Image (cartoon, rainbow, N blue to C red):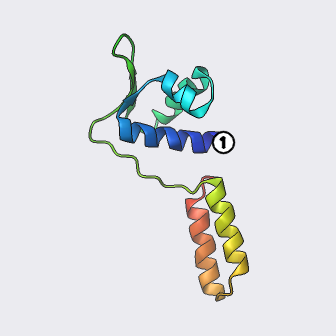
Amino acid sequence: MNASERRAAILEVLSGKRTTTSEYLSNRFNVSRTTIKRDIELLSLEYPIYTTKGNNGGIHVDSDWKYEKKHLSEEQLRVLKKYISSVRTSKTDKAAFVSILNDFSAL
């Protein structure tokens, strides 16, 4: 899993749990807490994510926020590219398919 995929997965976790800890995310994604801290800092620039310290601290999102996945994973992209290269279709349909892949590719 690359950094972009991990950050998307962190957003999915936050969307479901609403609150979590860097320790939980670190263990879940098998990366250091420092890596999670950097991920959260970057994500908080675009998403309503905030952190609190103390006994009830953690990583939180606004109560009305929901993550909508917008990108294909590397594996999804690989499979779709393989599929489109093996299917007979019109040039117009193939161009539309490639456009969709480009629009939803995180790369």
Residue 33, above or below 73:
above
Residue 82, above or below 88:
above
- Residue 49 versus residue 77: which sits nearer the camera? 77
Q: Is residue 67 left or right of residue 107?
A: left
Q: Secondary structure at mark 1?
A: loop
Q: Is residue 5 left or right of residue 68?
A: right
Pinpoint residue 86: horizontal percent, then vertical percent: 72, 79
- Residue 46 versus residue 2: which sits nearer the camera? 2
Pinpoint residue 28: horizontal percent, then vertical percent: 55, 32
Answer few, some or many: residues within 10 Å of disc 1's Cα (few below 14, many 20 plus, some between 14 and 19). Answer: few
Report the residue at 63% width, 28% height from top: 31
Residue 88, above or below 46:
below
Report the residue at 37% width, 17% height from top: 57
User: Which residue has dot 1 on it?
Assistant: 2
Report the amino acid beneath label 1.
Asn
Report the residue at 41% width, 52% height from top: 68
